[in-house]
Structures are given as structure tokens and as C-alpha cells.
Amino acid sequence: MSLLLTLLAQAASGQQQPPQAPTAIFTANAHLVIVDVTVRDSKTGKPIEGLKPADFTVLEDGKPQKISVFEFQKLAMEPEPPPPPPTLADQKELPEDPKTVITTESPGHIQYHDKRLLVLFFDFTTMGVPEQLRAQDAAINFLNKQITSSDMVAILLNTGVVQVKTDFTADRDQLKSIIEDLPIGDMSDLAALADAGADTEEDTGAAFVADETEFNIFNTDRKLQAIEDAVHMLATLPEKKVLLYISSGINKNGIDNQAQLEASINASVKANVAIYPIDARGLMADPPGGAASTGASRGTGIFNGSVYNSQRASINDSQETLSSLASETGGKLFVDNNDLSMGIVAAQQQFRSYYIVGYYTTNAKEDGRYRRITVKLNSNTAAKIEHRQGYYADKVWGKFNGQEKEQQLQDALSAGNPVTDIPIVLEADYFRITPTAYFVPLSIRVPGSVIALAQKSSGAGETRFDFIGEVIDERKTIVAKVRDFIPVKLGAQDAALLARRNLHYDAGFTLAPGKYRVKFLVRENQTGKMGTFDGHFTVPDLAADSTLLKTSSVVWSSQREPLKAAVGAAERTTRKTNEADPLIVGDEKIVPNISRVFRRAQKMYVTFDVYDARPDPADYRARRVRVGMSLYNQKGAKTFETQPLLLTQMAPTRPEAVPVALQVPLQGIAPGRYTCQIDIVDEVGRKFAFPRVSLIVR
């Protein structure tokens, strides 16, 4: 098993960064716990008013807590009539500028009395122009017809960075003005999605990988991170908050980090934020094969239903994460309706009068463990009480001795409250090495922009990393482990450019076919920042299928890095170890391009194995496997095709495997989104395979 930490440079781009929102610092007392309690009559369902702190008993993990914050919030349910037309004097007055920071006087201070706090969060990074317009119209319709006297509305916008367009306000005119001025079209095209800085740096050919800006391409992780950022902005307000997350779904891409979803949910629960996702696509009824904006499908799938099933599965998949956000935070998912304002009203109607109950927990340990909350009425047992069931405590990674640091790592890996201070992306591939065993290389990438270095007088810097991970099979048995402590030292030039670079860590395991869960944790020991990855992958049993041509994972890369370029290593790699790794070719390491984003100035490297091809009758030690590659644009038209390559040689270290290594220059490819298809044909065995992947050329 080879374990390396490699520093990789980022290629530049001519795009400009999206405008940065004003930076705000939010602080809160970590020991103050706020619980929103709804008390209703069990028969009529009406809120019970007039209760006092003495009427409640609050327990945390079974221990009584002293109530320090208490208030009843009485909320109106009837829509407000439209405001009267403005007078001439009103028209001459200049409107007040909106407050672009969520403000609070102090932790635990109830700032909004008898108010319902609604947050309209528009995620433009997920929406095309039609969806952005539909969301804009729905918000304006709600403000015109459905807002009540108890409603205070804040507007947040995600265009690659979370912007507060206005703090909570009841000023309809100001809110409508902000909605009308939303940057329709922003982040709806490829250029904004693939933004990565200025194109002023020298292009070194194979020196490109994605840095943190390119993590925006990873729908699930970056969109969920934006939700978590928005929740942190709202956390200092003790009142109940309703986050209306308006988007076009969050698509999965096979490298999703379940830990980021859990972190966003946990942050929402702790901040008293209920998420109500609204799918801005409305009612979707695409015909089989796609609507007019989609290229026609090929083959018989349009007739036998497989294409339609795939379309429906894709839509359901994009809504699955939204459903998890809603159900785990006390919200509700709104889909398949063209009147999006009904979704806003549905969330509004869910939140009626309630009590704010706050206490300073007697358990001051910042161990990240789950604390269960119980709220009881001392009388009136016929009442129905609703409140959140608990929360995860904060974690503090301060100064610990070696044993304490190790225990912290083990606890963090197994905890239900993952940490995402360091964003992580991971790719798991598979290569067959025996009929029943597969080599599974894991590629893990961390953006250098979140790494702190201990600076030296020469400008150089250094830090140390802990890597800990485990692979769990379907029987919940740990079948593989990783534990590494890697010191990293950078020269002055590399340290200065760290914010525009990535750290790449790789590990490898030998596994049997099956479904697996991988949990990985990275800690940077200069500041104690940590990141958790939690995902799933499958190692197929290629021996079980004899009708199709068998292949390994297809590894897409824009980088072949010399092994000597490693800036840190867990162990000295041996020649025997390198020969067992299909991603090591000679003295170079093939670095997977996890984001599938390439530049025109680069070469695309495509690496995989073809298994069990039939021997050539003229030479039983040879095979006849022909491989080519094609690119299709978004309209389904073929825009690029390589000449077919005939491969005959077998891999010396992997039985019955024909290794494939393609190098494709991209300088003639127009920027855009493509479907890349690999055409693989066993000419003697008359079998074929056509693996596909979506990618971006900039």
C-alpha cells in the first residue's frame, strides 16, 4: 500500500470571481441551549397560552436544567391587506438601505417579539434562468398577498458565496425591491460555475488540479456547505427560524460526502432552524427521451421505458437530499407544483404560537456528543408538547497531549456529529488483481486554501497531518483501516502559493467484491482543523457477468506527477508496492481528476483495464482490444473523436488484464459541458463496452 501526500499546482482561468459578500463575524455562548416548545390542546389543536417558566421542567440527558430564557411568541395567521398607495411625500423620500448582516444584540436576547422569522434563501448555483424567474415571481406573489403582520423576512442569495441581501424586516417595498433586483441569469451558465481566478499564471502543462474554487462544481458538498454557512449566520437568534431553501434540487455525483449533509442538519437543529426546501422546477412531466431542450436518446430505451425510468430516477435523486434536510430539521419538502408561493405559505402556516425556553447547560464538556432534551409540563397532562429531541455539543480541538489527540481522532471518526472545517473530496476506484480480489485506490483531496502553516524566516512553512480512515462492509465489519501521521514541509515559493493549490493523499486496499462504506478523517495539526468524509462505493463482482466486456474503473486525470514531487510521506514506498498500484507508471503517479474539469491547454489521461478478452488466434499470448474516445456536446452532437487504438499487450502484474492508457490533447476542444464516451471492443470475443462520464472543458 502506497501512502503519499503530494502538492499539486492549480491552473489559472480567465474568469472573474463572483462578488464577495461583506464579511461578518458571529459569536454565541456555546453553553446556552434554546428550545422552541409548542404546547397545544390535545383535542382542539389550539395553542395554549399563559404558561409560566414554573409550569415547565427541562431535562438534558435526564438532569434538570434551570430555565434562564423564556418568552411566548404569539403569531398572526391572517394575511395583511396590501399597503395603501404611497403619498407624494412618501415617493420623494429615499428608501433606507437594507442591512446586509444578520444582527443580534447578545446571545439569548429575544430581539423579535411575536414575530415569525422567514428566510428566503435563493440558491442560484442550482437554478437555470427559467427556475430563477419562477422563484422570483413566487416571492413577489407571497409578499403581495400572503405576508402577515407577524412575518419578518430576510433574503439570502447563493451565487458561489452566501450573501445577505437584507436582515429581517417587515418592509414590503424594500423586500420586493430586493427580489426584483436579483441577478437573474447569474450562475446559470458554465462560466460562472467553473470560475477559478485570473488567467495570469504560467501554464505548466500537467500542473493542473482543482482547488477550493473548483469544489463549487461538486453540487452536493458545496450547496450543503452554503446551507450550513447560512444557518451559522442565523444561530445567534434564539427565536425559531424558517429557512425556505429555493433551488432546483441537489444532484448527487457519486463522490458525495454524507458527513457534509449531517453537519448541515446538525447545525440547523442546534440553531433552531427548520429547513423547508422548495423545488423551483415545479411540476415536471418530461416526455420519454427528454423535452425540447434535451438531445434525443439513442437505441431502444425510449420505447422500452428505460430512458424514462432513468429520467425519473435522476429527478428523484436530486430531491432526495432536499427531503433529508426537511425531515431531519422539522421542515417539509415542497415539490411538483408550479405555484411556488404555496410552498412559502405552507411553511408559514406550520409555525404558530410557541414558547422560547432557554437554559445554560450544566454539562460544559465540549465533546461533540449527542445531548437528549426532554420538556415536560408540570400540570395539564392533556396538552400536546412538540420540541426538538436534542442536539450535538460543540467540539474543541485545543491543546491536548498525544494520547488525548489520538482519542479525539477516534471519537470524531465514530461520532454522529461530523466536522467539516476542512472540505474533503474522495474517489474510490477498483482494479482486479485476482479472480476474487480487487485493488481499491482511494484518492483524497484537500484545498490548500484552508491549511495553516508554521511560517519560517525563509518564507517556507510546515505543518503535520493526521489521516485516519476505515472501510466497512455490508455486515458492518471493518475490513480495512488507515492511520497515518505525515509531516509536510514546503519551500518558500510553494508555501506562498498554497492558497491556490491542493494537497492530494492516496491510499490503497485489497477488497473482495461487495458494497462498502468509507469513513475518512483529516486533521491539520497547526490549528486543529478537521474534515470528515462519509460515503459509499461498490466493488463489482466481474466474475458473475460473462455477457459483457469487463473493465475496471475508468480513471480520468489531467495530471501525472513524479513520485519524487511528494512533499510528505507516511512510509518509504518500495518498487514492489509501486508495481501493484495501477495508478503508478514508472516513476510517475496518475492523479485522478475528481471534479472532471479540464483546461484546453491540458492533456486528458484516461486509464483503465480490460479483463478476460479472448486470445488472438494467431498468438494466444496477445489480445485484440480496440479503444477510442468521443465527446458529445449538450445537444448530443459528436464534436470530437480519436482514432481507434489497437491494444494487444497484457499487464505483467494483473492476470488477464489489458491495460489502457489514453492521452488526449484538449487544445482543439471548445469550452463547455460534454459527455465523454469510451468505445471498447474485444474484436476476437465480439464483446464491447461504452462507459460514459460528464465533464467540463474550460
Image (spheres, rainbow, N blue to C red):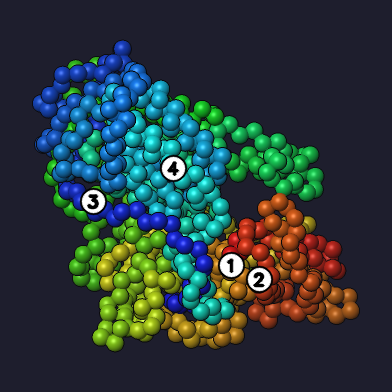
* Pointer 4 residue: 182
What residue type is disc 4 on? Leu
Answer few, some or many: residues within 10 Å of disc 2's Cα (few below 14, many 20 plus, some between 14 and 19). Answer: some
Q: Give the label on residue 666, or none.
A: 2
The tag earlier along the polypeptide, 2 or 4, is: 4
Between the residue at mark 2 and the residue at mark 4, the CA separation in whole angstroms equals 36 Å
Do the CB atoms of the residues marked 2 and 4 lie less than 8 Å apart?
no
Q: How many marks?
A: 4
Determine whether, in the image, residue 307 is placed left or right of residue 226.
Answer: right
What residue type is disc 3 on? Phe
What residue type is disc 1 on? Phe
For mark 2, give the secondary structure. loop
For mark 4, give the secondary structure. loop
Furthest residue to the right? 618
Do the CB atoms of the residues marked 2 and 1 lie less than 8 Å apart?
yes
The tag earlier along the polypeptide, 2 or 1, is: 1
* Pointer 1 residue: 598
The tag earlier along the polypeptide, 3 or 4, is: 3
* Pointer 3 residue: 26
Between the residue at mark 4 and the residue at mark 1, the CA separation in whole angstroms equals 31 Å
